[in-house]
Amino acid sequence: DAKTTQPPSMDCAEGRAANLPCNHSTISGNEYVYWYRQIHSQGPQYIIHGLKNNETNEMASLIITEDRKSSTLILPHATLRDTAVYYCIVRVVSSGSARQLTFGSGTQLTVLP
Amino acid sequence: GAGVSQSPRYKVAKRGQDVALRCDPISGHVSLFWYQQALGQGPEFLTYFQNEAQLDKSGLPSDRFFAERPEGSVSTLKIQRTQQEDSAVYLCASSQGTGNYGYTFGSGTRLTVV
């Protein structure tokens, strides 16, 4: 699976949009971009994933560049409860056997009051 | 249940002691993973089950680590003769299928070896 690069930490004001970048310049055509987050003392939580189109769900939006070498996770109105480590993961998806997630160091997002 | 349940939540073991960590995945979930997370690090893959079959155990750090899922539901991770470097949070995750699904993680078991 392709390697990802994320900034180690970011701050965001409560109520503002949080934009978390991720570089995955070696991504292959059959690799998806996944985002998970981990709140302190909890297990990672799935947020969103995409292949090449932008995606949106109730938690966040995922913007993938046209060349797919980078992406941005957007939390539109950050709250204090969004303070967590955010992981960007690139993973091949196959129907026959599930593939493990390879976590990097992630981005520590701190939402400030 | 509604989520992935892991027990115990905390475990303190004396060095050399054997421990068993339990994972109850979401009912009907086919795929089950174990991860190890050291303090300040991201989770690292240990092993993967598809139903009762252990398809990948490449992440197990030594032969002291053993995992099973005999009936394709509950899984147990066993660590024999624990050592201080085994101290970590052990996470279990499950997924309903083998394809393009998000995984649901439990809250983990924090193992401290003293």
Image (tube, coloured by chain):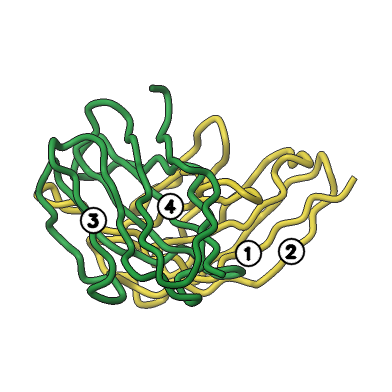
SS for callout 4 = strand
Q: Quick check: B54 left or right of B19? A: left
Q: Residue at x 46, y 43 (%)?
A: A46
Identify the residue position indicated by label 1 in the image: A107
Please name which of the two marks, 4 or 2, marks the residue nearer to the observer. 4
Q: Which chain is home to disc 1?
A: A
Give the quadrant of residue A30: bottom left
Verify CB contact (< 8 Å) between mark 4 and mark 1.
no
Q: CA distance from mark 4 to mark 2?
A: 26 Å
Q: Which chain is yellow?
A: A
Residue A107 or B112: which is nearer the viewer? B112
Left/right of residue B112 with respect to residue B53 in the rendered view: right
Residue type highlighted by circle 3: Ala
Are discs 4 and 1 both within one chain? no
Residue A112 appears at what percent x and percent y?
Answer: 86, 50
State if disc 1 and disc 3 touch (CB < 8 Å): no
**Chain in green (letter):** B
Host chain of mark 2 = A
**Number of residues whose C-alpha sits closer than 10 Å to that of mark 3, classed few (under 14), some (14–19) or many (20 or more):** many
What's the residue at 34%, 35% (across, down)? B24
The answer to the question of whether label 2 and label 1 lie on touching residues, with beta carbons closer than 8 A, is yes
B52 or A93: nearer the viewer: B52
Task: Tell me the residue that label 3 is attached to.
Answer: B67
Please, which residue is most extreme toward the right here? A113
